[in-house]
Image (tube, coloured by chain):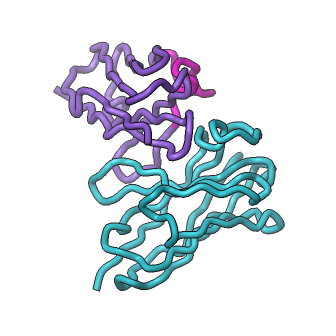
Chain colours: A purple, B cyan
Amino acid sequence: DIQMTQSPSSLSASVGDRVTITCRASQGISNYLAWFQQKPGKAPKSLIYAASSLQSGVPSKFSGSGSGTDFTLTISSLQPEDFATYYCQQYNSSPYTFGQGTKLEIK
Amino acid sequence: EVQLVESGGGLVQPGGSLRLSCAASGFTFSSYAMSWVRQAPGKGLEWVSAISGSGGSTYYADSVKGRFTISRDNSKNTLYLQMNSLRAEDTAVYYCAKAQWACSSTSCYGLFDYWGQGTLVTVSS
């Protein structure tokens, strides 16, 4: 199975900051990488697919990059609604695995 | 508008069974693979199972293989998860998720664009 490792596990930032979350796959997955945002008590929301393609309706403040084993999610100009938990997920092959999550908190 | 509505969760004793349903609308259900993803209380996301649009191909996580069965009724636009021999570690919110693309490769099955609101399964005596 492909293991997905996110860092950091938690992150404190202020409104207006720019933050970056990293995700590493245990083996190459090309660009079969998605990012999700989840708020407490809610279903995950898809942000990015194919490592860098923005889902419809997702603001351009979210961006993704990477290929192979190393990926990043960058969120610019943080707003209060951006504070949530973020997950990466590989869909290169079954079983489809998620990172452990990064909790983004307000400083 | 795509809608996915799960039902069937509840409290069940260890060793018991439960069947979850996911009613889909707003898209051509039979064209898209579907998955179940779960989240234990306070934990991360775990993919559980996937099924192709036709229902002819199914995939499972090792943690549920042999105990859970995914199926679909395309005439009713409904996805199911039959869960047998339930264990305490199966306690979680179970989400159904729609594949983003209507294609037949396993990499397509694992990319999700819409999720249901989830249904809670609690396994406890």
Q: Is residue B117 visible?
A: no
Q: Which residues are magenta?
A: A46-60
Instruction: Give the answer, above or below, for where B44 lies relative to B23.
Output: above
Q: Nearer the viewer, residue A40 or B34?
A: B34
- Image coords of residue A88 (percent x, y): 42, 33
Q: Is residue A51 visible in the rendered structure shown here? A: yes
The number of numbered badges drawn on the structure is 0
Q: Residue at x 76, y 39 (%)?
A: B103
Q: Residue at x 32, y 67 (%)?
A: B89
Specify the quadrant of the image occupied by residue B20: bottom right
In this view, the residue farthest toward the left is A107
Residue B99's spot in the image, x, y percent? 65, 43
Spot occupied by residue B114 in the image (x, y as percentages of width and height): 60, 44
Residue B4 image-quadrant placement:
bottom right
Q: Which quadrant: the N terminus of chain A?
A: top left
Main SS type for the magenta part?
Answer: loop
- Magenta-drawn stretch contains B111: no
The question of residue A58 being in magenta is answered with: yes
- Which quarter of the figure is the C terminus of chain A placed in? top left
Q: Quadrant of residue A98?
A: top left
Direction from residue B107 to residue A34 in the image, left or right: left
Front-lying residue, B123 or B3: B123
